[in-house]
Image (cartoon, rainbow, N blue to C red):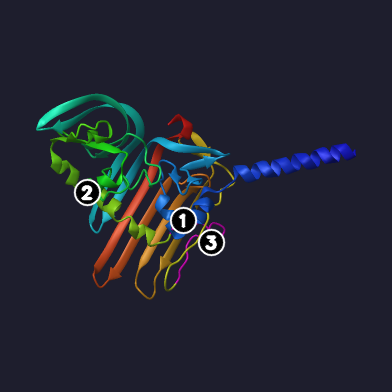
Amino acid sequence: MRGAIKYIAVFILLTLNASAVSFESVWEKATSLYGSNADRYLYLAVPLRADGKTVLSPLAKDGVSYYVKSAEYKVYVREGKEEKSYRVAFGIVKRGVVLRGVKNGVVVDFGEKELYDIFYRVKEGEKVVEYHNYFNSLPTNRSLRLFPGFFGSNYFGRLGMKDRDKYPEYVGCYVKSGENEFIWIDPSSYTKMGAKPYESGEKSLLSEKSLLDYASAHWELISELRIWNIFHYGIEKPKERRLTGFLKIDFYVKPVAEPYKFGNITLPFSNVWYEVDYKLSSETAKAALFASNYSLVPQRSFFRFKKSASSGKIDFEIDISIDDIEFQKMEQL
């Protein structure tokens, strides 16, 4: 009998330990690392190395780290009276790219190299634009997200050309819109012969703006809501709240009892809602998240930000919903 009791006690202990591992919150980890900046890693696409040992992953479950191999999602953006909706396909693939450079005014062909292609395919009505960003190795110390577009850029899906020197892994880009295209390739990481970057096509494609670019450039409006730690007012309390004064909300994601289907992986999701009415400064903010305890990639997010200030009014709304997503184990990248 004593042996049986001991066996049961060991079984319970192992079960509790396994549960503790399996329910480790990626949000709690993100908050412990980044505090109020943790919200900036919503929609993280590849793991981000916080220091020499710690890695923050888009999906971390049962001790396994995943990246986002591909995703398809819809984005609705409204700014004042102007509104647009977009469908976006995101992906990370290794593909062969022909590298060229310019030496003494002559185009030099270095042949095909296998590069990481981080791409966004944006469809607005009948218009389709593709943005491809080429790397010889994936950046691991900077945030790369599904939304709002490529890190380091004020333009959706494009790396700011003035910022390219900050990223030693960066090899080039390709933009295609209808019959127009632009390519910029820097071969310097593959040769010491002093060849300069090769550039061809319609460069103005790099500076085209849309409401999606506006949303990308103004994501900090959402950061002002301090969306990190999802829970303090959270799920077991009323869905809507009215406060006065300055907004500062801390909250952790809490899994719901029954798991939801998320792409090809089953994850627990929470629907977190809050509303704040600033009586003193006449500002209104709303946010809703369908969030996972394991993932920094919400299934759906809705944000609205209205603000009256001496410099003018901000009236901004965005709704993001993911239709399909495929996670892949990091060692397969």
Q: Earlier in the sequence, mark 2 or mark 1?
A: 1
Q: Main secondary structure of the magenta part?
A: loop
User: x, y (%) of residue 176?
Assistant: 20, 35
- Residue that label 3 marks: 232
Secondary structure beneath label 1: helix
User: x, y (%) of residue 85?
Assistant: 28, 46
Secondary structure beneath label 2: helix
Residue type at the position of mark 2: Lys
Q: Does residue 234 belong to the magenta stretch? A: yes
- What residue do we see at 31% from left, 41% from top? 168
Local packing at callout 2 (Cα closer than 10 Å; few below 14, some 14-19, many 20+) is few
Work out whether residue 227 or residue 92 is closer to the camera in this orientation and state it: 92
Q: Which mark is residue 34?
A: 1
Q: Give the residues in magenta.
A: 227-243
Q: Are marks 2 and 1 in contact (CB under 8 Å)?
A: no
Q: Quadrant of the C terminus?
A: top left
